[in-house]
Amino acid sequence: MARPSRVEAAAWLMFSAGGMVTALLVPVLMLLFGVLFPLGLLTPPDHAGFAALLGHPLVRILLLGLCVLALLHWAHRFRYTLFDGLQLDRMRTPISVLCYAAVLAGSVWAAVVLFG
């Protein structure tokens, strides 16, 4: 049996980290900003307070981390869906390059939006 490479281990680590962070934080953010604030069940933060919160560098770094990890989780899951589910294993290299290039592009875009 072949021993998994360090790159493969790192990819699975990022996949699981992205899945955990996405599963824990995205539903909370969706509940707050998609349901509770619009329905008036909770008082939304005022614009000045929210702008101050989003202006803090640590909050921006955490949001960027959430975006990057969610994109890595998506790329790894989508890549293996194409390999195993659609039996496109013969196209392993182009699929991997496209998936992780999309992660890189999305991460750069998120960084530009958050820090630009």
Image (cartoon, helix red, strand yellow):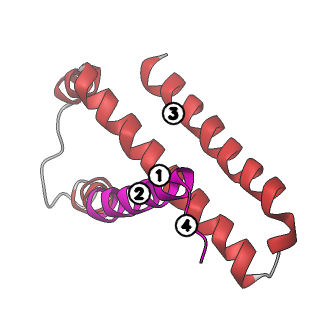
Indicate the amino acid at tag 4: Arg
Indicate the amino acid at tag 1: Ala
Tell me, yes or no, whether the two marked residues, 1 and 2, touch with CB atoms within 8 Å: yes
Residue at figure coordinates x 18%, y 32% from the top left:
46
Q: Is residue 19 magenta?
A: yes
Residue to which mark 1 is pinned: 10
Whichever of callouts 4 and 2 sits on the residue coming sooner in the sequence is 4
Residue 12 at x, y percent in the picture: 47, 61
Q: CA distance from mark 2 to mark 3?
A: 21 Å
Please indicate whether residue 3 sits to the left or right of residue 48 in the image.
right
Residue at figure coordinates x 62%, y 37% from the top left:
104
> Main structural element of the magenta stretch: helix, strand or loop?
helix
Give the magenta range. Answer: 1-27
Q: CA distance from mark 4 to mark 1?
A: 14 Å
Residue to which mark 4 is pinned: 3
Q: CA distance from mark 4 to mark 3?
A: 35 Å
Tell me, yes or no, whether the two marked residues, 4 and 2, touch with CB atoms within 8 Å: no
Residue to which mark 3 is pinned: 110
Where's the N terminus, which quadrant?
A: bottom right
Residue at figure coordinates x 25%, y 30% from the top left:
59
Helix, strand or loop for disc 1: helix
Residue to which mark 2 is pinned: 13
Tell me, yes or no, whether the two marked residues, 4 and 1, touch with CB atoms within 8 Å: no
Tell me, yes or no, whether the two marked residues, 3 and 1, touch with CB atoms within 8 Å: no
**Mark 3 or mark 1, which is nearer to you?**
1
Helix, strand or loop for disc 2: helix
Q: CA distance from mark 4 to mark 2?
A: 16 Å
Whichever of callouts 4 and 3 sits on the residue coming sooner in the sequence is 4
